[in-house]
Image (cartoon, rainbow, N blue to C red):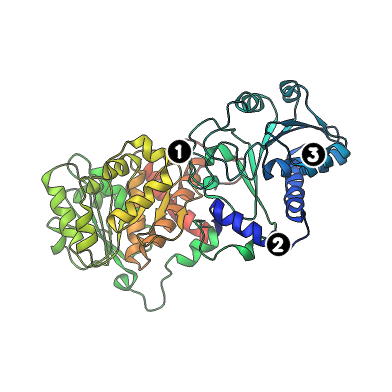
């Protein structure tokens, strides 16, 4: 599992570790890892032209010491000093190794093979200072590989927000632990490929991080596995209230996701029963009210229900049940936090996209997308529910606080009609199988993203490096879920 910690936590851990090490040892560890990562990005170090963008903080010192290491291996290293002062020891080391200070930063950047961004660090606030903006633009406009030191300059380490000009990196080498801004958009898009360098910080970090990103082994431990005495009821039965005369496909897709999510059976409630049975004859169909549908261990309500009065009635009835409930799409429209907080005897999982989250919070969609971490925390607290905020980076946050989970899988091709319906069915099925709301949401998002990758490169090709990707439909994502599940548990 990848974990991320806030800047204040990282600084405190670094201070504790520094007190146990010789003067400058921690920076040397970081510089050694940084130089090694840069070496791996260059075709060869000897003769390479490296430009260091150096600010006043420790990131500038890391860049200078790393530059000195590269210079000793034969690289031509030039430093562009952008702060009021540069790290004295790092600057002396660079000069001793044969590096130089740029007279004209733009001339140096025009011929650079690699640029190290050490302008600002995890303590930076807002965008780049005006004097650094032209240099950053020149670096990004060059043919050089841009490598951020710990964090791209101009992004917020704690929130992932980008409130001004920032330098977009091809890769980021971060130290000790990931920072939340490296894992959540919009800052994630500025970070490029991530590499974590171990500098010995782990023993000094708290046990509860700010953010978590699951990996295969974490998800495999969560997924339900039937035993010798399992039957469909022991495995869990999911009720799905979805679809309408106008949107029957939402019911079909939600049921498709549910059938591939590990529950023993799926009960469909709604007017699209014929369409559902035509595609999924194993579904148990009921045309009446949810409370009369029969025994379930969890509900999904909302996909494709439309805006009619029946939607509010169905949502209210499902929320009055004593089993976990997932509310999505039209079910979220006008949802009352007091109803969820005060009347729900079992967990609730809300799965809005940015537009739906904005409506629930009473803010603009742009505000949610610019501050996704703040938005998901606010929603979870306001509704007393677990919230899965869909989007370019999917976040899952529980009502009790604790780490926010960020989903590392997926593809931009997943932004297609109906994909959210598949996700709702999948997550609901995991709820019915007994997973906690946060685990169900995080595991479902992970599998959903993997399935989209598989579908995008073709069912037989997997998601291997170098495979070409193309458009996918929500139905193809649902079909690929079995393969994604197998990838995780194998």
Residue at 58 percent of width and 52 percent of height: 178
Q: Secondary structure at mark 1?
A: helix
Mark 3 Cα-neighbour bin, 10 Å: few <14, some 14–19, many ≥20: many
Where residue 250 appears, as percent x and y from the top left, is 27, 45
Which residue is the site of mark 1? Answer: 413
Disc on the earlier residue, 1 or 2: 2
Vertical position of residue 400 compared to residue 374: above or below = below
Image position of 114 with respect to 445: above or below: above
Disc on the earlier residue, 3 or 1: 3
Disc 2 to disc 3, C-alpha distance:
23 Å
Q: Position of residue 430 (x, y in %)?
A: 36, 62
Location of mark 2 (residue): 19
Distance of label 3 from label 1 (alpha carbons): 46 Å
In this picture, is 337 found above or below 229?
A: above
Query: Looking at the image, which residue is at 30% across and 51% down?
Result: 254
Residue 449 is left or right of residue 37, and the answer is: left
């Amino acid at each position: 599992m990848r974990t991320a910690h806030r800047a204040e936590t990282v600084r405190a851990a670094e201070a504790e570790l520094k007190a146990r090490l010789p003067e400058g040892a921690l920076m040397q560890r970081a510089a050694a890892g940084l130089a090694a990562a840069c070496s791996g990005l260059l075709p060869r170090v000897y003769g390479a032209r490296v430009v260091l963008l150096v600010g006043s903080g420790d990131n500038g010192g890391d860049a200078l010491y790393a530059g000195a290491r590269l210079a000793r291996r034969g690289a031509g290293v030039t430093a562009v000093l952008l702060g009021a002062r540069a790290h004295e020891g790092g600057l002396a080391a660079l000069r001793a190794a044969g590096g130089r200070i740029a007279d004209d930063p733009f001339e140096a950047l025009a011929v650079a093979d690699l640029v190290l961004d050490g302008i600002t660090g995890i303590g930076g606030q807002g965008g780049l200072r005006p004097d650094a903006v032209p240099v950053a633009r020149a670096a990004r406009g060059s043919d050089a590989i841009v490598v951020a030191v710990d964090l791209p300059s101009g992004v917020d380490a704690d929130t992932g927000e980008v409130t001004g000009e920032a330098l977009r990196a091809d890769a980021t080498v971060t130290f000790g632990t990931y920072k939340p801004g490296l894992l959540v958009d919009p800052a994630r898009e500025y970070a490029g490929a991530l590499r974590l360098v171990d500098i010995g910080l782990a023993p000094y970090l708290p046990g509860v991080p700010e953010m978590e990103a699951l990996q295969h082994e974490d998800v495999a431990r969560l997924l339900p596995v039937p035993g010798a005495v399992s039957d469909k009821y022991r495995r869990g039965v999911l009720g799905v209230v979805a679809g309408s005369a106008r949107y029957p496909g939402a019911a079909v897709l939600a049921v498709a996701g549910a059938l591939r999510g590990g529950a023993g059976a799926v009960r469909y409630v709604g007017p699209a029963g014929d369409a559902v049975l035509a595609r999924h004859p194993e579904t148990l169909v009921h045309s009446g009210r949810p409370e009369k549908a029969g025994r379930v261990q969890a509900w999904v309500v909302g996909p494709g229900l439309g805006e009619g009065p029946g939607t509010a009635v169905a949502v209210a009835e499902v929320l009055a049940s004593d089993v976990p409930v997932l509310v999505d799409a039209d079910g979220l429209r006008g949802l009352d936090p007091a109803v969820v907080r005060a009347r729900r005897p079992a967990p609730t999982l809300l799965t809005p996209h940015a537009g739906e989250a904005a409506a629930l919070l009473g803010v603009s969609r742009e505000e949610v997308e610019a501050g996704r971490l703040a938005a998901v925390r606010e929603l979870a607290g306001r509704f007393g529910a677990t919230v899965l905020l869909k989007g370019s980076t999917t976040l899952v946050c529980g009502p009790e606080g604790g780490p926010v989970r960020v989903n590392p899988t997926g593809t931009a091709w997943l932004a297609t009609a109906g994909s959210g319906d598949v996700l709702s069915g999948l997550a609901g099925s995991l709820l019915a199988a007994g997973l906690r709301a946060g685990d169900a949401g995080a595991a479902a998002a992970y599998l959903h993203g993997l399935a989209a990758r598989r579908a995008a490169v073709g069912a037989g090709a997997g998601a291997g490096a170098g495979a070409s990707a193309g458009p996918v439909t929500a139905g193809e994502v649902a079909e690929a879920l079995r393969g994604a599940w197998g990838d995780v548990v194998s």
